[in-house]
Image (tube, rainbow, N blue to C red):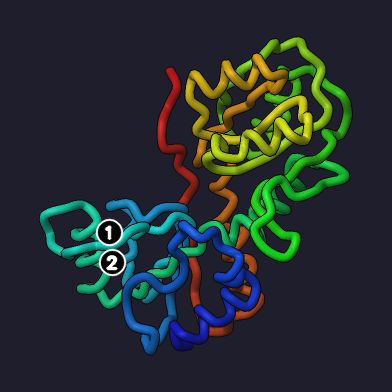
Amino acid sequence: MKCSEICALIEQEYGTEYACDWDNVGLLAGRRDKEVKKILLALDATDEVVEQAAEGAYDMLITHHPMIFGAIKRVTDEDMVGRRLLSLIRSDISYYAMHTNYDTRGMADLTARLLNLQECTVLEEVKDGEGIGRVGVLPEKMTLRECAELVKRAYDIPNVKIFGNLDQKVHLAALCPGAGKSTMHNALQFCCDVYITGDIDHHTGIDAVDQGLCIIDAGHYGIEHVFTEDVKAYLEKVLTGVHMDCVPVKHTFAVI
């Protein structure tokens, strides 16, 4: 199957028009006419992932986070991104990223279902009533501590960071997988009790609590790792004659 055909099938479900203006999604490197028989899916195109794609003779690499965000003036082996791109091109691997378009069309609903959020609405609209994150009611009123345990079970993560009184009761929750600092104001506008997201710094966390919003920081990777298996399941439905593998879940840091 041609790379161009696979791109079209991805964009049929996760249209690039649903990506945020600042994002960079779609085919970012490689040949559209490449014949694809093996696809590797990962959250990030790290050195380890690019090496796995090359050594495993994969024809296409699909990630959630784009390796390239802004303009690149040169591609050489003198910097990290250049080395990764050179490795992919040298191995004739087509590289595709599906970031906020997947957040809008897939990630938001999937992660809300895993958390069993009810009566959901969009946290921040991107296009045509669809958008990033969800606001919904937790299965029952619970303490912040109990909600944190629910988050850990829902996304199979070992730990979370919490801002707020662990014994405080929470019911209305905002959920934004990935980095949620920029959409915290939406959670406040919805008068949520708790905001479940990632990449929350010290000052943002304590300022949220002072405004009545508890924070559960599950990490950027902690929630978004569901991307690979979900996209693999979709592609298995629409592709024929293509083998797919997911990079195993491997949390990017440890808390000791």
Residue depicted at x 55% and y 70%: 16
Question: Residue drawn at (58%, 32%), measured in percent from left and top?
Answer: 218
> What percent of the width, then of the height, locates residue 22?
46, 57
Q: Quadrant of residue 239?
A: bottom right
> Residue 125: where, in percent of width, then height?
69, 54
Q: Secondary structure at mark 1?
A: helix
The Cα–Cα distance between marks 1 and 2, rounded to whole angstroms, is 5 Å
Q: Quadrant of the C terminus?
A: top left
Give the residue at x 57% y 84%: 240
Tell whether label 2 touches label 1 (CB within 8 Å): yes
Q: Which is more toward the observer, 243 or 45?
A: 45
Q: State whether residue 41 is above or below residue 120.
A: below
Q: Count neighbours of disc 1 (C-alpha within 10 A) and say few if under 14, some if 14 to 19, many if 20 or more.
A: some
Which residue is label 1 attached to? Answer: 51
| Three-letter code, disc 1 | Glu
Dot 2 amino acid type: Ala
Task: Where is residue 135? Give x, y as percent.
Answer: 77, 41
Residue 54 is labelled as: 2
- Location of residue 90 by image quarter: bottom left
